[in-house]
Image: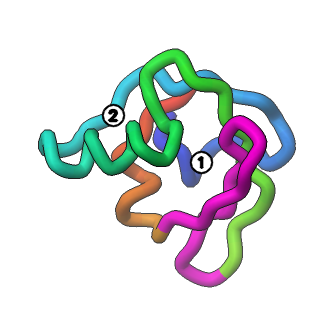
Amino acid sequence: MPLPLAPAGEEMTVKKVLSNEKNKRHFENLGITVGAKIVVLSESGGSVILRVKEGRLALDKGMAAKIIVG
């Protein structure tokens, strides 16, 4: 399922990143790689706030929709 549809507070595993190489590298630099564990903390307005490893980050829903989790 796309990341914005993931339930808040539940640890999910990144299954796929549907993006061009430039954005894939950007996601990798943020710690979002296939197999990574992430938790959706909240959705507010047009952003999805997540916990990746030890940090938090916010992605707009358009970018978050390119991350498939399961």
Location of residue 29 with respect to 50 vertically, above or below: above
Q: Position of residue 64 (x, y in %)?
A: 45, 54
Inspect the image, locate mark 1, and give the three-letter code of the amino acid beneath it: Leu
Q: How is the image coloured?
A: rainbow
Q: Quadrant of the C terminus?
A: top right
**Image quadrant where residue 21 sits:** top left
* Residue 25, numbered label: none
Inspect the image, locate mark 2, and give the three-letter code of the amino acid beneath it: Val
At x 56%, y 53%, the residue is 4
Q: Position of residue 15 (x, y in %)?
A: 45, 21
* Residue 17, numbered label: 2
Q: Position of residue 47 (x, y in %)?
A: 57, 72
Q: Is residue 57 magenta?
A: yes
Q: Which secondary structure lies at badge 2?
A: strand
Q: Residue furthest right?
A: 9
Q: Are marks 2 and 1 in contact (CB under 8 Å)?
A: no
* Residue under label 1: 5
| Main SS of residues in magenta | strand
Location of residue 61 with respect to 22 vertically, above or below: below
Location of residue 65 with respect to 43 vertically, above or below: above
Mark 2 or 1: in front is 2
Extent of the magenta region: 45-59
Q: Is residue 58 left or right of residue 40?
A: left
Q: Position of residue 36 (x, y in %)?
A: 57, 24
Q: Is residue 42 magenta?
A: no
Q: Which secondary structure lies at badge 1?
A: helix
At x 63%, y 61%, the residue is 57
